[in-house]
Image (spheres, grey):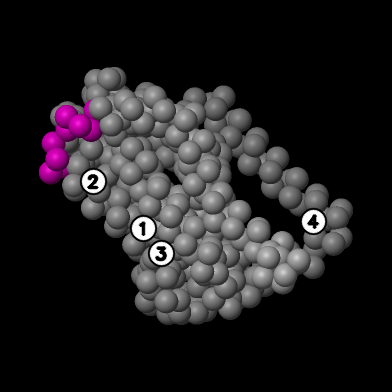
Amino acid sequence: APACSRVSPARLVRHALTLLPLLLIGAWAVADWHTVRDGAVRLASAHPGWLLAGLFFTCMGWVIAAVVRQGALPERLPPGLLLASQFAAGAANQVLPAGLGAHAVTLRFLQNRGIPLARATASLALYSLVKPIAKTAVLLAFLVAFPDLLHLGQLVPDERTLLMVAAGVTLGLVTAGVLVTVVRPLRRPLLRFLRTALTDARILHTRPSRVLALWGGAAATPLLQASVIASVGFALGLPLSWTQVVLAHLLASTAAGAVPAPGGIGPVDAALVFTMVTFGAPMGLAAATVIGYRVLTVWVPLLPGALVLSIMVQRKIL
């Protein structure tokens, strides 16, 4: 056979990876068609101005994600490609749970920019650590600033739930410690990773621009997400203030965010509806707001994000 007719396995794998996001989106759309249809019907009758505001805050979320990613790395990355990678990562994040899709895309992007694996992994770890810390700080600030808005008796978990959470965290830490102690091959790469992570964190925190990008961007992330929810809610006539929606989002994402689910869909949605109802929203309207929020932040950018992901894979940027 002529040489031009032969296709290398690497090229076949690359073409398969190019098409995989689109195939996964198609399968997911078929499986979750009712959500797409119900959300589209609700949004069709919503106020267009508020929906445009929600779309603006959604787009700003990708910008802030790129800012935080840059803040977690000492090396300077090309802003345009970094932003494109985060847009593509958003599509991948809806397929895999616990942010694994976004982390995988970002890790591939960083490696292709010449960042060593240990430093790229340390950057992802710092990003993952700073975001919940910053979100907790924002939540505490809102609780101090607006104590009258919170119905503590209905929203604070009971003792049994707190014990289960504490037991799960303890079990995870003990398991990790036992694995590192017993499995010797894990020690060296883990110690190398910890050294790199601590060194990079120290370097980053000597640069004010990186500190602002990392911590400021991480603190702005939940506020932007809540602003999308509030914009959709206002478009549908939700009788809650922006502050109430922000608190509802912070409480819901903090309480249910530990449950691994693609893009947080499922547990966080249920918790968000519950918290908004607790603040006084009708159940149907709260559910419609969450559905509209997911349509605006997941389904609307999903196909463009998958196309960007495929193009970046095809051009070997990822």
What's the residue type where badge 2 is placed? Gly
Near mark 2 (Cα within 10 A), the count class, few <14, some 14-19 or many ≥20, is many
Q: Earlier in the sequence, mark 4 or mark 3?
A: 3
- The residue labelled by disc 4 is 180
Residue drawn at x 50%, y 73% as measured from the top left: 73
C-alpha distance separating marks 4 and 3: 37 Å
Residue 60 magenta: no
- The residue labelled by disc 2 is 54
- The residue labelled by disc 1 is 62
Residue drawn at x 61%, y 65% as measured from the top left: 121
User: For residue 175, what is the image quadrant?
Assistant: top right
C-alpha distance separating marks 2 and 3: 20 Å
Up the image or down, 192 lies above or below 33; here it is below
Query: CB under 8 Å between callouts 2 and 1?
Result: no
Q: Secondary structure at mark 2?
A: helix
Q: Does the rendering let one see residue 100?
A: yes
Q: Earlier in the sequence, mark 3 or mark 1?
A: 1
Q: Secondary structure at mark 3?
A: helix
Farthest residue in the front direction?
1
Relative image position of residue 54 (x, y in whole percent): 23, 46
Query: CB under 8 Å between callouts 4 and 2?
Result: no
C-alpha distance separating marks 2 and 1: 13 Å
What's the residue type where badge 3 is placed? Ala
Asked if residue 59 lies left or right of residue 20, the reply is: left
User: Range of the magenta residues?
Assistant: 42-50
